[in-house]
Amino acid sequence: MKHIFAKGSNPESPTFLLLHGTGGTERDLLPLAERLDPTASVLSVRGNVLENGMPRFFRRLAEGVFDEEDLVFRTKELYDFLDQAALEHGFDRDNVVAVGYSNGANIAGSLLFHYRDALKGAVLHHPMVPRRGIPLPDLTGVPVFIGAGRNDPICPAQETEELAGLLEGAGASVQVHWEYYGHQLTGTEVQAAAEWVRKQWP
Ligand code: MLT
């Protein structure tokens, strides 16, 4: 997958897997990683699917309606890519924390929903429930930050609560941070995520 890898100065810090929103690129979330932990390594990936020229991480049939078959296929593709990238770039595969926004948060959520050992933790900005009706793997102790908008037209507050409940049901420790700016990623949300990251991985 097309990506940027930048080695961090602290080998103890997690490697951030950066996953952009629809229409974004692997450059979009680099400043965000800098805010979360400037000493961390960064693996920033571009989605392999194009929707009218806009990169995404999986296909959708309509706004908010995911192509489930493609979601499962692309989730495995990303999962396999992580193994390969860890070998190529020499980062610790067991110390990867996803940081995703919107479509990128949804594929990060899908990694958690499908694989027990995909991620050490996740920062999900405005995620949706990636899939329903499947048993989740054991996520005991996996910390997850969810940034959400009470008035997000793409992900209603109820869906945020559903996602938090599903992850908690699988054993994850979830913190939800609420904003009131629709689907936007605001400075205060990033600030809250940065404080949360510092608590998880001081
Ligand atoms: C998605 O398709 O993943 C969500 O609708 C978020 C987005 O607009 O990308």
Image (cartoon, helix red, strand yellow):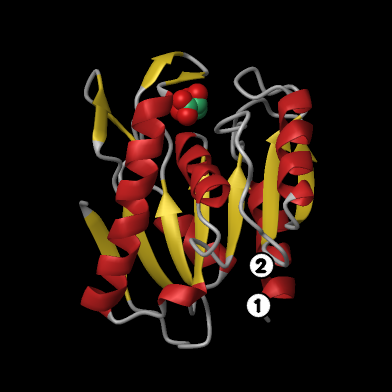
Indicate the quadrant where residue 173 lies. Answer: bottom right
| Image spot of residue 54 (x, y percent) | 28, 27
Q: Are marks 2 and 1 in contact (CB under 8 Å)?
A: yes
Query: Circle 1 — which element?
Result: loop
- State the residue at coordinates (51%, 47%): 114
Pointer 1: what residue?
Answer: 201
Asked if residue 145 lies left or right of residue 73, the reply is right
Residue 76 visible at all: yes
Crowdedness near tag 1: few (<14), some (14–19) or many (≥20) residues, C-alpha within 10 Å: few
In the image, 109 versus 41, the foreground residue is: 109
Question: Is ligand 1 less than 8 Å from the beta carbon at label 1?
Answer: no
Q: Quadrant of the C terminus?
A: bottom right
Crowdedness near tag 2: few (<14), some (14–19) or many (≥20) residues, C-alpha within 10 Å: many
Q: Amino acid at mark 1?
A: Trp
The residue at the far top in this view is 62
- State the residue at coordinates (22%, 52%): 1
- State the residue at coordinates (72%, 52%): 170
Picture disc at residue 197: 2
Indicate the quadrant where residue 18 lies. Answer: bottom left
Answer above or below: position of 73 versus 112.
above
In the image, 47 versus 23, the foreground residue is: 47
Answer above or below: position of 150 versus 32.
above
| Image spot of residue 134 (x, y percent) | 60, 35
Asked if residue 121 lies left or right of residue 86, the reply is right
Query: Circle 2 — which element?
Result: helix
| Image spot of residue 160 (x, y percent) | 72, 33
Count of numbered marks: 2
Asked if residue 202 lies left or right of residue 88, the reply is right
Residue 27 visible at all: no
Q: Amino acid at mark 2?
A: Val
- State the residue at coordinates (46%, 34%): 103
